[in-house]
Image (cartoon, rainbow, N blue to C red):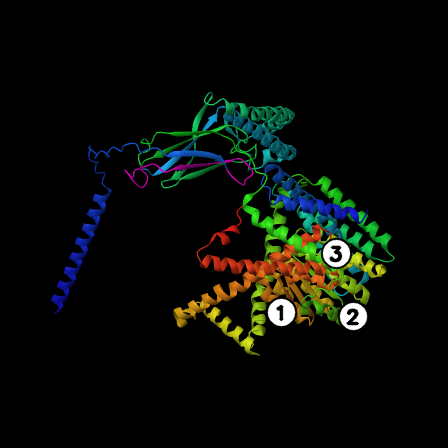
Amino acid sequence: MKQQLPRIIVLVFGAFLLFQFFVPHESSEWIYEFLLDWIIIIGVFALAVGIWSLFNVHVEKIKTRKFGWKYSYVTLAAFASMVLFGLTAQNGQEWGWFFPFLVTAVLTVMMIVQAWASKGNAKLFLIAAGVFGLSAALIAWLDGSWSFYFQTAAPLQSFMFRRTFDNILVSLHATMFSLLAFFIASAAYRAFRARNVMASLLLIAALVVMSRFNPYLEPLFGEKVNRLSNWLMNVPNLAAQRAIVMGIGLGMVATALKVVLGIERNYMGKG
Amino acid sequence: MVNSVKGRHMKHKLKLVLVLLLFCWTTAAAQSDTPLPDTVAAAPSIPPPAPVTNLQAVDTDNDHGHAITLTWEKSADDGAGANAVVAYDVWRWYPFDMDVVDSLRQDLAATRDAVRAFRIDLPRAERALEELREDAAKLNTTRFRVAVPDDSGFTLTVDYALRKLEDTIAYMRDNRPTLMNRIKPEQQELDQALERLTQAHAAFPQNGEWRTVGKALAGATGFTNTGSKDQTSSDFFPDYSDLYYRVEAVTIDPTVRSEAVQVGPVQSTGQWFHTGKIPVVLFVAMFLVFTVTFVQLAKRGTDLYVRPLSGIEAVDDAIGRATEMGRPILYLLGIGVATEVNTIASFSILGRVAKRVAEFQTPIIVPCYDPIVMAVAQEVVKSSFLDAGRSDDYRQESVFFVTNYQFAYVAAVNGIMLRERPATNIYMGKFMAESLLLAETGTLAGSIQIAGTDEIAQIPFFIVSCDYTLIGEELYAASAYLGREPVLLGSLKAQDWAKAVIMVCALIGMVATALGWPAFAHFFQVTG
């Protein structure tokens, strides 16, 4: 039954969604939207599982003193700080005891992590976690310059959350993305080496297309190169892309049918 | 000589002054309020254009309902005759009960908004009151006081602010339960009004009026009146109700229009089958037949030949290499979610790879981008280890969630590549801009790399950076290749046959269209 039930669920819902594609009626749309809502609900619970996994992996790393284990403290401290920034907001202009609270709260988390990761001194770290946790709770209770917001999105616009998000995370993302330019250059260098006839053809085609899109070279080569480049992009390139897309479409249908019919069960962990 | 130069300068200056004067005069003249002549030439009177003919209203095909399509034959004065028609006004008869529904809907929305606002603002106001009470003494003594207008004018008192805030809080506390209690009866009233709409429409032409629902430009011979299926929307369009329409041809003078042509009653309903998708149904049915046939053939033991894929055949070598080097294998499922077919295909490949990995006793690392994907991947890897008889070797931490921010994920995975130095990197699934960042880092780390994706734009990046690349559909075939199970190979054969059918259809379509018979190609057009 443990093996049959998932297959029955997949068959029923898979077949329903297949038929739903051909039924434009409102009731069919309603069921489809209802199922999509379930994906969101499952996603929310899965996020908790994901965060637990992240926490566990880093604690394990600290525990086993794996290479770079010290960075796991940074990850966990940053994680705890962002959670606190996302749940708290100032009530006025004053910060009050927010930063001592933040430090004690993060230290509480760190002590719990340390207790988890340590082999012999767990009790000591747990006592320290209790002391820090109590201090954090006391500050939170007594300080009125900021509050916890659980039901509103106010903290998402708070100073600390926005500043850390906009000034740290967004900049780091942009940095990672900008590395792509250098990687493209190194990859292009490897790809365009004229080692044989085919690679030479690729190099020539690439040079033509590049000269078309280069603002400095384009006026030098004139209209003929433009037309050749457009032909390369719109005829051989597009034809190959369409062939691949058609294959992908068939592959998707085949996979979906295999899953619905229960032929492919590997994704359920049944190899 | 000097005099002549001076004379020329004088001439230039004079010219300049004259030009400036001319400019000033023309500007002033242009800006002066010259009265318009009293007698404006009267526009020539336009005779009313001929009305549209053969007006028909039908339920719109292949939709979920809530739409009516009108068709007509153009007015005789549209593009011909007096050529006076500029547009067609479309009117629908609205019972006054629609206004009642709208008003009830707005009331309910306002009540809900108020309750929501109270829920957020009441705690804020209470906190503000608490703070104000604490600071009242300080505020009264400091140089910068709170400026609050009171009943007698503009004074500087904290007491007044306190009183006002207390009143507001009291008002919120008193009214919130009342407002909350109002939601249910208001909803019931709205439901009843919505139920009455069908009867109200049937009462045509009593208790209602014509209202414009749209405009079609001259030359048009049709119009679709579409509304929302959402009963809480102001654009709600009722199904199963008798609807009446009017169309008028309009001239450039909006008061001059043709006689209105009326049509109705007509009802909108949703359809149970989309006729525009018949080719898809046929194709799916054909594919199903192929799949079942080849699977049955495979079960009976028929030898099915499938073209070898170097990328798949390299998987075993890559796992062997990792075992020999004593390094782990890094498997990435991409940035897709568990509902995407490419991710499902990747799960299948992961299952096969994990089984081999378990047999070879090589460590595997699977950093995940999505928590649901992580949960499924953990289960897949665990089952594979179990199948290989190595359940004790399975470590749950080997499949873990990293983050669902694209470039943060790249940073984390690149870090893993450079720290752990995996012998083999396998990329299977959906990859976007991160593909090259990952694959190039893998190259720098000296790993053997096998990639497979159905994202057309990323395939070239993988081809350049990886040792083996599964292009497009090969990603979907990989699991069957790795498993070599006859049933799965049967489905691959079905795929090949479907491709052959598509190629034949494409050739026939080309020839038929070239010979002036486009009906064959048109048959495959899918709408909606």
Is residue A55 rendered to the left or right of residue B107? right
> Label 1 amino acid?
Ser
Q: Identify the amino acid type marked 2.
A: Thr
- What is the secondary structure assignment of the residue under circle 2? helix
Chain under callout 3:
A
Horizontal and vertical percent position of residue B346:
69, 58
Say which quadrant the N terminus of chain B sits in: bottom left
Q: Magenta stretch containing residue B65, yes or no?
A: yes
Instruction: Determine whether label 3 and label 1 are within 8 Å by CB.
Output: no
Q: Main secondary structure of the magenta part?
A: loop
| Residue at mark 2: chain | B
Residue at numbered disc 1: B465
Residue that carries the numbered disc 3 in the rendered image: A266
**Which residue range is magenta in the image?**
B60-84
The residue labelled by disc 2 is B323
| Residue A172 visible in the shown view | no
Per the model, the C-alpha gap separating discs 1 and 2 is 23 Å
- Which of the pair B9/B388 is nearer the observer? B388
Residue at left offset 16%, top offset 57%: B15
The image shows residue B492, relative to residue B194, as above or below, that is below
- Element at label 3: helix
B22 sits left or right of A129 in the view: left
Q: Is residue B73 magenta?
A: yes
Q: Is residue B315 left or right of residue A209?
A: right
Choose mark 2 or mark 3, whichever is in front.
Answer: 3
Residue type, numbered disc 3: Asn
Residue A156 percent location from the top left of the image: 62, 45
Res A16 seen here:
yes
Q: Which-is-in-front pick, marks 3 and 1? A: 3
